[in-house]
Image: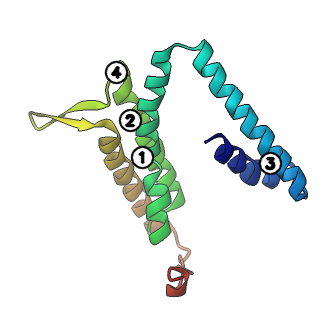
Amino acid sequence: MAIASGNLFTRNIYKEFIAPGCTPAQEARAAKLASFAMKLGALFFVLVLQTTYAIQLQLLGGIWICQTLPAVLIALYTRFFNPWGLLAGWAAGIGSGTWMAWELGLKSSTYPLHIFGWTVPCYAALSALVLNIAVGFVISLVLNWASKAPRYDETVASDYVG
C-alpha cells in the first residue's frame, strides 16, 4: 500500500502541481520518498498510538470508501449526475456515515435505523450510500433542470470495448 500511495502521490500531486517538468528519475525518487514517508507514518501509528485507533480508523475507512462509489462508478457510465450533485452526495454520505459510527462510540458499524416504527439493523456504509445517491440524484436533477447549457456525452461504444 505504501508503494501504491507513493505512486499515487507522485503522479497526481507531485508531477501535476509541484514539478510538472520532472524527469522519470525525479518522479521515481519522489515516489520512493513518498512511499518511505507512508511507511514511517505507519510505524509511528503502530508504535505510538493506541490499538483501538487502528480499529476505529478501519471501521471509518470502510464507511468512507463506500461513499466514493457514486462519484466513480456512476459517473463513468452516465452523464446525468452533475459533478456538484455528486460532491454534495459524497459529503452527505461521509457526514452521515461518520455520524452513525460516532453515535455507536466507534465500536460497531451496524446502526439501528428506525423506519416507520420498525428498528432495522443496517451497515452504516450502506445506509449512508443510499443517502449519498439520493442527495446526488436530487441535486443533479435540480441543477440539470436549471442549466440552460446542453450536456453532451462524448463517449462512444469503442471507448468501452478493448
Residue at x 68%, y 50% (from the top left corner): 8
Mark 3–mark 4 distance (CA, rounded to whole Å) = 37 Å
Residue found at x 42% / y 42%:
92
- The amino acid beneath tag 4 is Lys
Instruction: Give the position of the C terminus as an image quadrant.
Output: bottom right
In the rendered structure, which disc, 1 or 3, sits on the residue that comes first in sequence? 3
In the structure shown, which secondary structural element does the residue marked by tag 4 occupy? loop
Residue 97, label in figure? 2
User: Type of residue at label 3?
Assistant: Tyr
* Vertical arrangement, residue 24 with respect to residue 125, above or below: below
Q: Nearer the viewer, residue 38 or 116?
A: 38
Mark 2 crowdedness (10 Å alpha carbons): few <14, some 14-19, many ≥20: many
Q: Tell me the amino acid under the disc marked 2.
A: Gly
Q: Which residue is mark 3?
A: 14
Element type at mark 2: helix
Contact, mark 1 vs mark 2 (Cβ under 8 Å)? yes
Above or below — where is 88 with respect to 48? below
Q: Position of residue 145 (x, y in %)?
A: 43, 68
Residue 159, labelled with which disc?
none
- Amino acid type shown at disc 1: Cys
Q: For the N terminus, which image quadrant?
A: top right
Of the two numbered discs 3 and 4 on the same chain, state the one appearing first in sequence. Answer: 3
Could you give the CA–CA distance between mark 1 and mark 3, rounded to whole angstroms? 27 Å
Q: Is residue 153 above or below residue 9?
A: below
Q: Nearer the viewer, mark 3 or mark 2?
A: 3
